[in-house]
Image (cartoon, grey):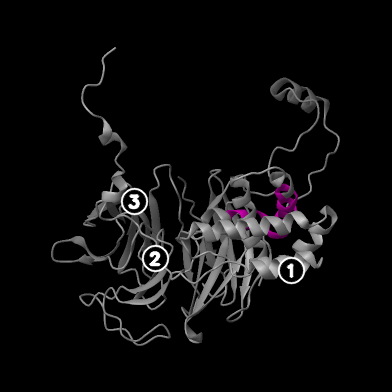
């Protein structure tokens, strides 16, 4: 077989970067978004107020920031709260959320699917089922179409 | 692609063909404009029973995606993948159609267009996640327009509304019969309405359905929209913050699992190797996504009938009770 004697590094060039008409999302100031308050959420979990913890962890979602650490911390915190719930309480918890809350929960759930750990997928799937019946397929479509997400 | 003529009145009907060609029929002057992915548009006039095309100089270098006659039918607007809108009007001297382009600030393909009843304002939904209203005032062929709730300065290309939080590609836009409100549907499964009389405030309603592809005003407050869920939905807009879902327009009929004749039984067995009657169709009239809704009968302010066409190749006529 013929062997490549000339470099083929050109094949790895990202041509889209050189496109003058490339579509760029509008920048929104996201430097101040820090994600949900860890201390507040932790204390609510410890005191057994899981509904309160859920409301707290869904506040200040790091949607506009590009800081991956903030996003990961937020996701970890959400996962902690979701895992603390008993299966039978999940439905009531989801119903206490409003439309935007359900959409946000769905975003966190799918983000959680991306990096599965021990038992996370099973828990997330239970939450997914309840969130789906509350938000409909529309909430999943919004996870897919959101340009800026958690 | 199919066009149906109902009765003696020419109707304005949209239809798709495989090539994403778009078509619009002007009822009063009985002219058709078609545009295609070959970057051309033609205006067809009926002469002696035959449709004769006239070329339109659109000057775009990408496919045309949507076309609409203006209410007075002296011009039409054409949206394209070239990130611009071509507003075309007839020039008598050379017997052809000329175009003027609206480019700024469109950043991606124009997916849908709708004219305001004043024949000047044009709404455009685009894949750059924005919904905008432009002025398409062509001073060569018309008088200066009076002020509207959307604005009073309207030179060609002026942007009177630019909404950027649409959340997804804007598939379809529609002005209310009075022109004071603009409704659009976007790919994030939401329907939104902007109200000119209330400081252009936008109300968005997210739905739990699959994305809607087409939206149509059937009265000043009632809106019908349809899309990937294969069924038209009715919404009601009464003011800022009051956009709500009313009902599904298609009531699925309960199929009776009645007695099948022996003949049908054997036919099923022979053709499909099934022994029982199985429901493989969706529980609604359309069996695939609805791509377009169109007014069929009735003035814009009180639509009596509207039609829907879908990817299943079917066209359904719906009655609307006010």
Residues at marks 2 and 3 on the same chain: no
- Mark 2 burial class by Cα count in 10 Å: few <14, some 14-19, many 20+: few
Per the image, the residue denoted by label 2 is A26
Give the vertical position of A30 relative to B20 (above or below): below
Residues at marks 2 and 1 on the same chain: yes
Per the image, the residue denoted by label 3 is B49
Give the vertical position of B50 relative to B182 (above or below): above
* Residue range corresponding to the magenta coloring: A124-141
Report whether B168 appears left or right of A106.
left
Which image quadrant for residue B248?
Answer: bottom right
Give the vertical position of B21 relative to B197 (above or below): above
Which image quadrant for residue A48?
Answer: bottom right
Q: Secondary structure at mark 3?
A: loop
Where is residue B265 shown, x and y percent of the image?
80, 26
Per the image, the residue denoted by label 1 is A43
> Between marks 1 and 3, how big is the CA–CA gap?
80 Å
């Amino acid at each position: 077989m013929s062997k490549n004697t000339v470099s083929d590094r050109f094949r790895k060039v990202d041509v889209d970067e050189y496109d003058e008409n490339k579509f760029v999302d509008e920048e929104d100031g996201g430097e101040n978004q820090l994600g949900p308050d860890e201390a507040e959420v932790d204390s609510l979990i410890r005191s057994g107020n899981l509904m309160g913890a859920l409301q707290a962890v869904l506040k200040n979602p790091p949607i506009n920031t590009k800081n991956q650490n903030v996003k990961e911390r937020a996701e970890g915190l959400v996962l902690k709260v979701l895992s603390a719930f008993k299966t039978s309480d999940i439905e009531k918890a989801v119903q206490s959320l409003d439309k935007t809350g359900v959409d946000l929960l769905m975003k966190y759930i799918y983000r959680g699917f991306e990096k599965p750990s021990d038992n996370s997928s099973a828990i997330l799937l239970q939450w997914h089922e309840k969130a789906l019946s509350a938000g409909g397929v529309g909430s999943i479509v919004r996870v897919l179409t959101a340009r800026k997400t958690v | 692609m199919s066009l149906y003529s109902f009765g003696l009145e020419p109707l304005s009907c949209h239809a798709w063909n495989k090539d994403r060609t778009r078509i619009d029929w002007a009822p009063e002057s009985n002219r058709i404009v078609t545009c295609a992915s070959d970057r051309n548009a033609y205006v067809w006039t009926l002469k002696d029973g035959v449709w004769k095309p006239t070329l339109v100089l659109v000057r775009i270098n990408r496919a045309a995606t949507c076309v609409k006659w203006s209410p007075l039918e002296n011009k039409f607007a054409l949206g394209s993948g070239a990130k611009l809108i071509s507003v075309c009007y007839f020039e008598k001297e050379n017997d052809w159609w000329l175009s003027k382009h609206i480019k700024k600030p469109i950043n991606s393909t124009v997916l849908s267009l709708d004219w305001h009843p004043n024949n000047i304002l044009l709404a455009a939904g685009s894949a750059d996640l924005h919904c905008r209203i432009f002025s398409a005032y062509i001073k060569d062929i018309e008088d200066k327009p009076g002020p509207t709730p959307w604005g009073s300065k309207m030179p060609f290309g002026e942007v009177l509304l630019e909404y950027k939080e649409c959340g997804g590609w804007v598939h379809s836009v529609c002005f209310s019969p009075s022109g004071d409100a603009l409704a659009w549907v976007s790919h994030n499964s939401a329907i939104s309405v902007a109200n000119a009389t209330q400081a252009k405030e936008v109300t968005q309603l997210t739905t739990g359905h699959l994305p809607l592809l087409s939206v149509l005003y059937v009265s000043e407050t009632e809106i019908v929209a349809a899309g990937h869920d294969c069924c038209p939905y009715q919404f009601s807009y009464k003011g800022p913050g009051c956009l709500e879902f009313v009902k599904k327009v298609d009531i699925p009929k309960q199929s009776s699992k009645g007695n099948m004749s022996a003949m049908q039984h054997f036919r099923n067995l022979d053709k499909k190797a099934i022994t029982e009657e199985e429901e493989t169709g969706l529980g609604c009239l359309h069996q695939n996504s609805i791509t377009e809704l169109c007014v069929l009968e009735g003035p814009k302010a009180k639509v009596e009938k509207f039609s829907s066409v879908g990817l299943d190749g079917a066209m359904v006529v719906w009655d609307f009770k006010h």
